[in-house]
Amino acid sequence: MTIPLVDLRKQYAPLKDEILAGISRVLDGMQLFLGENVQALEKEFAEFCGVRYGIGVSDGTNALQLILRAMDIGPGDEVITVSHTFIATAEAILLAGARPVFVDIDPQTLLMDVSQIEAKITPRTKAIMPVHLYGQTVDMDPLLEIASRYGLRVIEDACQAHGAEYHGRKAGSLGDAAAFSFYYSKNLGAYGEGGFVTTNDPELYRRVRMIRDHGSERRYYHDLLGFNARLDEIQAVVLRAKLPHLAEYNRLRREHARMYNELLAGLPVQTPVECPQNQHIYHMYVVKVPRRDELQAYLKEKGIGTGIHYPVPIHLQNSMAALGYQSGDFPVTERVAGEILSLPMFAELEDPQIEDIVNALGEFFRR
Ligand SMILES: *Cc1c(COP(=O)(O)O)cnc(C)c1O
């Protein structure tokens, strides 16, 4: 048996002809950046998210950084976020010149514990960056209430949440702006690098667009300090071919999650907690288990791929040492890092595969 954590080949097969034809048209025309496919994707994905404006960019990390720069958040400023996320969340804040300030997570959802935000607000705080980790949105209503009371901007890290919903509203439409990643294994993935910014704010839209292309609106006239964070046409072709299927991919992921939840009941496995106001899109299906490392090795031997997202909290990473955090600062984040395990999850996963995976977990715990 071989079941990878993510299998992207099955998704490609039915789209192959359309994607190759689209790429061929791009190469025939040799308009390789910010052309008709990027422009169309900007409309289509903004519409999918329920926002007015969308900007195709080079990747998710730069999407976050572009938003921060467009908001003039930089040296001397603080941004409140979590340590239990992919490193890029904190990197983007530091690359913009600002300082990430962490709060702990909720032990059930593994998402930002919104009740801890207020205590971390200082005169330097400029924004809150909730991370919709694994495909489930942070509890945004109380977060937005705090942000509005203190005059803070809200930047969603929606890099794992393409299509996730909160009270029927899509991730990417819940704050002042949001960053998406089209890294190949995300729920909507390119065949190279890609990212996206969503917002309803026309001025922010204008500034992000400029900064992504060297701060210019008119070629060789540079009104803002920018850099290169453009999306290319070939990636836009791939993304446009997949976007019409994204809702169905997410629906299938949710079905797989329901099946996992049912079959895993009775084992010493804590299945993911989905809040009633949320539509989780299971970018990752993450369980908490005892003897995690032993179990992961056992599953590997059986041919089952798993992952740990993420094994080392950001505040304990070597690259973040200058922030001055210590072990013990975020007890829930630190504890769950040793318990979490991501099981295989992708739209094309098959029921018998889920049964095999759960059987292997059962064997391990019965040994
Ligand atoms: C993937 C990801 C990013 C970064 O996206 P890239 O496209 O890889 O730069 C940022 N934040 C989170 C939570 C992610 O999962």
Image (cartoon, rainbow, N blue to C red):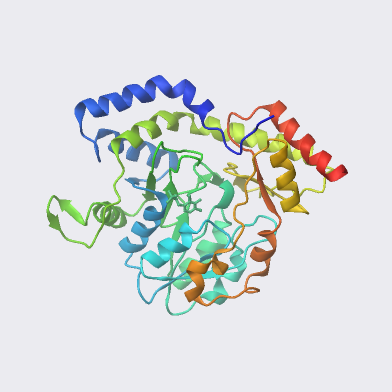
Measured along the vertical axis of the image, is residue 42 above or below residue 294?
A: above
Q: Nearer the viewer, residue 305 or 229?
A: 305
**Image location (x, y in percent) of residue 350:** 66, 27
Using residue 98 as the reference point, say whether residue 319 is left or right of it.
right
Residue shown at the point (30%, 53%) measured from the top left = 205
Q: Residue furthest bottom?
A: 123
Looking at the image, which residue is at 25% across and 59% down? 226
Q: Identify which residue is drawn at 39% across, 74% down.
A: 77
Looking at the image, can residue 80 be seen?
no
Task: Depth check: give the residue in front, 61 or 200.
Answer: 61
At 41% from the left edge and 54% from the top edge, which residue is drawn?
Answer: 61
Q: Quadrant of the C terminus?
A: top right
- Residue 155, percent from left and from top: 44, 59
Q: Position of residue 113 (x, y in %)?
A: 61, 64
Q: Position of residue 192 (x, y in %)?
A: 39, 40
Instruction: Name, please, the residue furthest toward the right.
Output: 366
